[in-house]
Amino acid sequence: MNFNNNVKYFQVAQGVWGMRIFFVNVYIVANRRGFPKGWVLVDAGVQGSADKIIAFAESIFGAGAKPSAIILTHAHSDHTGALEELLKRWDVPVYAHELEIPYLTGKSSYAPADPTVGRGLMSLMSPFFRKKPLNIDAKVKTINIEEGIPELPEWKVVHTPGHAPGHVSLFLPLNTTLIAGDAFATTKAESALFLLNNIKRLSGPPAYMTTDWKAAKESVRKLADLQPRIAAAGHGPVVRGRELQAELRKLADNFDKVAMPNSGRYVGHSTQADETGTYYVPPFRSSTKFKVLVGLAGALAGFAVTRALVK
């Protein structure tokens, strides 16, 4: 862990740094010598975190540091929360997969979260997460999967859908470093206890926002086949070496049992999306369990609001 001007961040690999903001990670990746100078920001954290992200960058590169681009693994609210504020200060392009573009140009909302899966506080709170699109049309550039990202020439872009239609991961073959986004987690993302304490547990993608489990399974298998030696996920600590390779292979081989919920809105009934956005969402089947969960989530939200007003 590094501290520079009271900014707390961690080293992932040479030229790669991460910062945990509340329960989600953002990453900075710098190009090596012999390649175009510059660095990129990967993901944009939760709403209200722009100042922390800027301080993170300046602690490494100095005052006034600005990325050459922002790369989004996907456009969920915990990965784009500070994006609009950052773009007011940094005039840079934002790269995303073509299937994520509708959620960044005001054209489509994501499918609703499923609070019935995951058995954790984050799952219960998921219906309150933003699913409406941003509109940063003037800044967005579509990632060319084959050619990669010009501002990050050594890294390969891997399409890893399931958690989101256009979810991507970044992979550096030189030292097999993987930035996985939410293709899988290195903690139990449904649990506030695990998230807030950054407890290590390699697991599937955050269940409450995963809308295509068949694709999510294939994406984990694809990443396991890369045999990364370093993995930095959107949620959880960095995992390395044989532990990573063994646990990732185990997750890929046993995905149906250890990652996929037994039931849920999107289990066996995935959403459908294309370059225009989400065009089919499976109907929700209400149950007593759901009504209890909604009641608990509402009570928790009310408690949080009350505490904020009292303070």
Image (cartoon, helix red, strand yellow):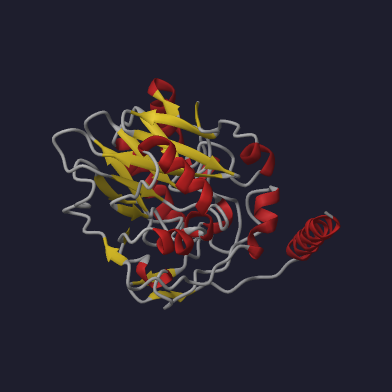
Q: Give me the residue at 54% from left, 52% from top.
A: 49
Nearer to me, 248 or 192: 192
Side of 14 relative to 109 (left or right): left
Q: Is residue 63 visible?
A: yes
Q: Which residue lies furthest to the left in this view?
A: 34
Residue 170, x across and y down, in percent? 31, 44
Q: Give me the residue at 52% from left, 60% from top.
A: 77
Side of 67 relative to 254 (left or right): left
Residue 269, x across and y down, in percent? 50, 65
Q: Quadrant of residue 293?
A: bottom right
Q: In which quarter of the image is residue 275?
A: bottom left
Task: Give above or below for 81 relative to 220.
Answer: below
Q: Which residue lies furthest to the top in this view?
A: 242
Residue 203, x across and y down, in percent? 52, 39
Q: Which residue lies furthest to the front in this view?
A: 63
Side of 254 relative to 73 (left or right): right
